[in-house]
Image (cartoon, helix red, strand yellow):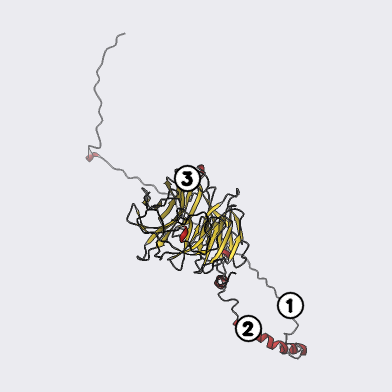
Amino acid sequence: MFFVDEVLPGAGVDSLWRKSQESCCESKSTQTAPVSVAESALQVCCTTDIGTQTDQNKIQGLDFQLGAALHHPGLEKFLHGVEGLVIRELNKNWKSHAFESFEVNWSEQNRTVSCVYRLHYPEALEQKLQVTGVSWNSTGSVVGCSYGRFDSGDWSIEKSFVCTWNLDRRGLNPQYPDVVLDVPSSVMCLAFHPSQPSLLAGGLYSGEVLVWDTSKTDDSLISRTGMTSDSHMDAVYQVSWLSDLSRSHHFQILSVSTDGKILVWQLEGEGHLTLINGFALIAQQIPRNTKVNKHSRGDAALGVTSLSTSKFDPSLFIIGMEGGHVLKCSASVEKTALSKDPCSVLLKAPAQFTYFPHGGPVHCVDCSPFHRNLFLSAGTDGQIHLYSMLQAKPLLLLQLSHKYLFSVCWSPVRPLLFAAASGEGEVLLFDLGKSSQQPAVAIQQNPEQKPVYCLEFNKKQTHLLAAGDASGMVKIWQLSSEFTEEGPREMRHLEQLANEVTD
């Protein structure tokens, strides 16, 4: 069998598309089956009404004209006999002021004090740093705290922090502050600006005063005093903002140190704080109604640990000292201080009057926001003194703790209420309208009974109180309504207290 190649002719198919004239169209259609519609109705077949009626009362209606049957001669005689007495008592009640200023509060009363936030910074806790200061900003929504040390440790070179939390922010994490400021030295105190919510001033163990703007994300530090001859030589234990009397809506920064100086700084642009005024406490210039430490030289500087400016007279301030002394001072003095420290401004001697001292350093003083002459002081002797600026001896002397008292502050809304921070780990709330010797509430800040170093009422959200302790924790306490609502005649009681005369 043999195979050979064979070539066959190709096959082709003509395109109908190209031959449009030959194209054809076909139409197709479809139809559904007829749609049937049916209607149905429902009707009850019958209805039933049922009623009920009480039996007709066969007793006739009462005749209220039966005066003769209700007449009791003894009752009539009694009412005539007490008529005069009742009228006199009604007139007396009508003229009484017992319920003067009383307002009915229909809202639900909260009678407990509870912790609503536990704030801390993990890195500060790892370094075993303590909360040395707390402050609320001008809106009342942000709380700031400074970390440092009050106990042993190398304060001068130990890194520390300033942290802030916005309590109104959604998703608040108590362990992660909104702002963390790294500081090369222990921060001993801080204070928010009275009207600018992002400005924050702090005092360092090194003697510097710093100002931060927390709204800046790149570099929050906007001003500092630097380490010059004008700076403090010891730790700064308090900073506060003062109204500039020469310029409205402007503020200056006041700093207090154990080097015996009280300095006033001005924000001059960005980068530097300029010293514009200052005071020095020298032993021989203290008023003679006190006994300063007999071992102090006449020209020795006396350490200042705390200060409070009068809410009624910006030129008047109270200071607490290392030696336990409490002094009334004036910023308008012209007397020159006998200080040997070099300074670019002339330091003045502000002391005007001395009060009965504490048995140890005074950690805190606070002037009343409701009375121009009253102020409180707290010291390491565990006592709180309530003074009138017009008398040397305290109006009240309260022994609150067997350990130190570190802070005391008046309520911004209750004239007779103040809070104190104890070395036994308690926050004490005192209501002088109820008791002048026992606290109304003693709140345990931490189970380890570590000292509470600082506290501050919120002036905007007045039911909140911030307290910081040695464990590195800031707790926000929500106060009950009895601590936030002024009672009737409370101001009158405060006035009577201020007018008492000590022996």
Q: How far apart are marks 3 and 1 (CA)?
A: 95 Å
Furthest residue toward top: 1
Left or right, 25 with respect to 459, comes to left
Disc 2 versus disc 3: nearer the observer: 3
Q: Where is residue 340 in the image (x, y as percent from the top left)?
A: 40, 54
Tell me what residue is drawn at x 29 percent, y 11 percent: 3
Q: Residue at x 52, y 64 (%)?
A: 289
Residue of label 2 = 92
- Helix, strand or loop status at disc 1: loop
Point out the image quarter for the C terminus.
bottom right
Please name the amino acid that badge 3 sits on: Trp
Taking the image as drawn, is residue 57 in sight? yes
- Amino acid at circle 1: Asp
Q: What residue type is labelled 2?
A: Lys
Q: Name the residue under label 1.
A: 55
Residue 413, placed above or below residue 185: below
Tell me: residue 404, above or below residue 459. above
Q: How far apart are marks 2 and 3 (CA)?
A: 67 Å
Name the quadrant containing residue 61.
Answer: bottom right
* Above or below: residue 318 compared with residue 157: below
Looking at the picture, how far across and down is residue 281, in whole percent? 45, 58
Q: As displayed, is residue 248 above or below residue 120?
A: below
First in sequence, mark 1 or 2: give its number.
1
Q: Return the x and y of residue 305 as percentages of the image width and height.
A: 49, 55
Q: Identify the residue at horizontal 34%, vertical 53% (top origin).
A: 272
Marks 2 and 3: CB-CB under 8 Å?
no
- Circle 2 SS class: helix
The residue indicated by pointer 3 is: 155
Q: Quarter of the image containing the N terminus?
A: top left
